[in-house]
Amino acid sequence: MRNYYDLLRQDVRFREGLNACMNCGVCTAICPAAEFYNYDPRQIVDTVQSGDNSEIEDLLKSETIWYCGECMSCKTRCPRGNTPALVVMSLRTLSQQLGFFTESEKGRQQFAIKRSVGENIFKYGYCVATYAVSPEMHAEQGPIWKYILENTHDIYERLGGQINELGAGPLRRIPDDAKEELRKIFDVTGGTELFNTIEEHSRKKASDLGLQFDDEGIDNEYFIEVYTANNKNHTTP
């Protein structure tokens, strides 16, 4: 078994986020996620700091590391200068690299994020392009969202937007050379490799579950499963 603590130590976020936790619990007291989810940043840091390989592996496969909203409230209050949110970031990345993220419901949603928000960066130059959001996939937006999409140009142009057109202004079209530069940044920084790793492990999980998995797009059984799944055990009573 690989030493997960040593692997975490290779991440600069981990080295900056964990100095010497004394387990005071201030991070948990200030944490918004801890109020609603089965989540305790103090316990996460304690587990990691113990160096127990088996417990860290359980953490990497758990729902827990995906509950953090990365608001950084923990950083502002820790008396030892720790940042549990940075520790969680490094845990998430290692979970993705090792394929452990597919072992939890929230972890599997990384595939949906990669196929939607992640790939939007290359398609549109934006993480979220409002004109590309499907009303069917976002029922929580209500019927007004469908109206906005059907009347996108009229609505957003009145607000100063330049919908999918070259030039200045909100929602403008990002030039192809700029999007190509984004791809190169992902290549150099390891983002492309991580995206490919998420795809590889998600494909294997889809096969294990007997679900359809397409090489691209969101119209496949595995995407719909990870996008909609909710076992309702994530929040506190």
Image: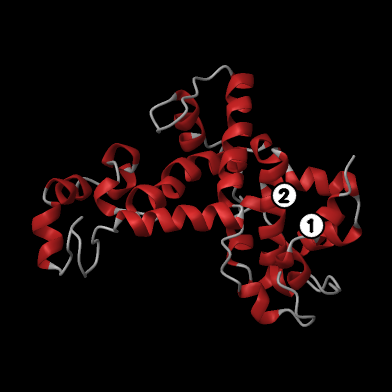
Per the model, the C-alpha gap separating discs 1 and 2 is 7 Å
Q: Secondary structure at mark 1?
A: helix
- In this picture, residue 221 sits left or right of residue 169: right
> Do labels 1 and 2 touch, CB within 8 Å?
yes
Q: Is residue 14 above or below residue 234?
A: below
Q: Amino acid at mark 1?
A: Leu
Residue at figure coordinates x 30%, y 46% from the top left? 133
Question: Which of the two residues, 168 or 13, is positioned nearer the viewer here?
Answer: 168
Q: Amino acid at mark 2?
A: Leu
Question: How packed is label 1: few (under 14 Cα within 10 Å), some, or many (20 or more)?
Answer: some
Q: Is residue 126 visible?
A: no
Residue at figure coordinates x 61%, y 62% from the top left? 35
- Location of residue 196 (image quadrant): top right
- Location of residue 217 (image quadrant): top left
- In this picture, residue 17 sits left or right of residue 52: left
Picture disc at residue 8: 1
Image location (x, y in percent) of residue 75: 67, 76
Image location (x, y in percent) of residue 10: 79, 60
Picture disc at residue 215: none
